[in-house]
Amino acid sequence: MSEPAPVRSLRDWLDRLAATGRLAVARPGIGLRHEAAAVANRLDGHRASLFPQPGGHPGTIVSGLVSSRAWMAEALGTAPDRLVAHFQRAAAEPLPWRERTSAPAQAVIHREGIDILRLLPVPTLNEHDSGPYISAGLMISRDPETGVQNVAILRCQISGPDRIGVLVLPRHTDNFFRKAEAQGRGLEVALVVGVDPACLLASQAIVPLGRDELEIVGALTGRPLDVVRCLTNDVRVPAEAEIVIEGRLLPEVREPEGPFGEFPQYYGERARRHVMQVDAVTHRPNPIFHMIVGGGLEHLLLGAIPREATILATLQRSFPGVEDVHLSLGGVGRYHLYVRLRKSQEGEAKNVLLGAFAAHYDIKHAVVVDTDVDIHDPKEVEWAVSTRFQADRDLVVVANAQGSKLDPSARDGVGAKMGLDATAPLDAPPMKFKRIRVPGEAEVDLDAVLAPGTDWRAAVG
């Protein structure tokens, strides 16, 4: 059976979800402050949710678009077990985008008297969030020296009618901003809301500085992404997007932003952050505003899948026996890594653990297991640890290492890393670690052998 075709717009994906019973439409008027987020969280992982006229606003909110690995794979036209490999290939072989002169994203234009909360139904999500946030916006920026673009999802607080507080981490967007600020000018950016799943996933790719993530979108879907130039700057944005907010990150300006509910399911603290001055807003007629609830499945999976692709490629360069990796949801899609290894010599698993810690600084705990263990099933991994791991010989601990600054147990991002070698010894007797199995269990046709509705007393006779 062939895989479904990849989708190339948010609306196409909503049609697919609706046709298969995976889209719930709320009654009009669900509240913008916490209520929409509460409903979305209750449906998280089961159905996407759509909110018409939330809080009396004429717009529409959607959430939970990619809260399942299987959904993400379907949207990209691949199988769930090939999702990471598909993303690896796309990141390694990007497809340049194709520029258009007009686009649905620019059907309606606002340049004067901009008031973001009047134009867009921006919700307040978690209990102690400092206010309305754009949580699913792609921040697209251009290197002021080379013109190469970068794409990232950054948390964006509505701080005023045409002013947005932005958490810019010390990565590529920050690199571009520092160049612009050194020249005494702002960094031209566009905040894009309401894109297809491929754009969302590509935005999280871990690629070298100078690689435009929009080119990965084309490789993910098998066709160049159509883009259009912004009206007030040179940034190129997805032509099929729902909403584009054009503006500049202001030089030498920092204002309070936060707190905000983050992926570890704690709050990112309040501090003085970068500020975006809005110059224009464009959108489709009746645009759809995408909301990612902080700490939900959509938030976790969008971060986990691209990291898995990068970590897998990094490990396989040194350890060809590494077959797969998985960042567990219990580890918030960032901190806990499971590695499936076809071990060829003793001690190899410990080297793999050290390689995993080097592959991404966010990784805090890692477990290496044999190929008979399903690393996507946490019960399987726990079973391997319980039966193949001994702390006095199989434990690796690295103290005072760089980790995530959003880990509340770390000291400003510095903490310990722990690795568990849960592989069986190569010289173990054949039956010592052989898993039990009932022959034919997987092949049983339950419908053929069970008799629903039969009274047990009649069956006994």
Image (tube, rainbow, N blue to C red):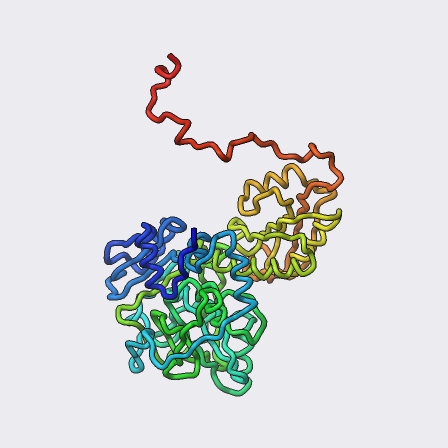
Give the residue displayed 31% in from the left and 82% down from the top. Answer: 111
Q: Position of residue 359 (x, y in %)?
A: 64, 61
Give the residue displayed 36% in from the left and 71% down from the top. Answer: 240
Q: Nearer the viewer, residue 53 or 407?
A: 53
Q: Is residue 45 above or below residue 382?
A: below
Q: Position of residue 448 (x, y in %)?
A: 40, 29
Residue 428 placement: quadrant? top right
Q: Nearer the viewer, residue 151 or 76?
A: 76
Q: Is residue 301 left or right of residue 392?
A: left
Outermost residue, front side = 1
How many numbered marks appear? 0
Q: Is residue 48 above or below residue 454?
A: below
Q: Is residue 96 left or right of residue 283?
A: right
Q: Nearer the viewer, residue 239 or 251?
A: 239
Q: Is residue 122 above or below residue 246?
A: above
Q: Position of residue 152 (x, y in %)?
A: 48, 69
**Residue 55 at least partly seen:** no
Q: Position of residue 263 (x, y in %)?
A: 49, 57
Q: Is residue 77 above or below residue 284?
A: above
Outermost residue, bottom side = 183
Give the residue displayed 66% in from the left and 50% down from the top. Answer: 419
Give the residue displayed 53% in from the left and 44% down from the top. Answer: 377
